[in-house]
Amino acid sequence: MAALADISPDSVRVDRIGLGGGSSDEAWCYANNFMVVSEDSSFYEKSLFGPPAEVAVLILA
């Protein structure tokens, strides 16, 4: 399986930008004009109320 960085070289992980220990609200605010890729459904729920970010939720079985 390819890493996200292989598919989208401009992608960043929250822990690499100092938000790894922060809340999902902090990451959501940072994500202005970005797409959030997450296993956390709370980002999907936030996206129902609109911007700033677009969301792709990964469901792993």
Image: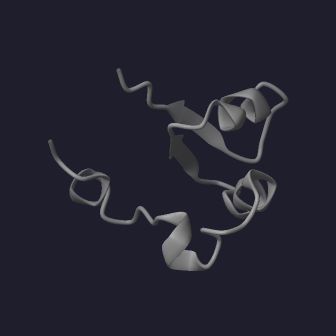
Q: Residue at x 30, y 52 (%)?
A: 4
6 to 51, vertically: above or below? below
How many numbered markers are drawn? 0
The image shows residue 8 at horizontal and vertical percentages of 32, 55
Horizontal side of 21 relative to 7 (left or right) equals right
Q: How is the image coloured?
A: one colour
x, y percent for residue 6:
21, 57
For residue 32, above or below residue 45? below
Residue sitting at the far right: 49
Report the quarter where the C terminus lies: top left
Compared with 50, 4 (above or below) is below
Please give left or right for residue 3 compared with residue 1 in the image.
right
Give the residue at x 44% y 31%.
58
Q: Residue at x 41, y 61 (%)?
A: 11
Image coordinates for residue 57, horizontal then vertical, percent: 52, 31
Viewer-nearest residue: 45 or 34? 45
The image quadrant that residue 23 belongs to is bottom right
Q: Say which residue appears at 78% left-offset and 34% top-offset.
A: 46
Indicate left or right for 59 with 49 as reference: left
**Split into 4 quadrants, where in the image is the N terminus?**
top left
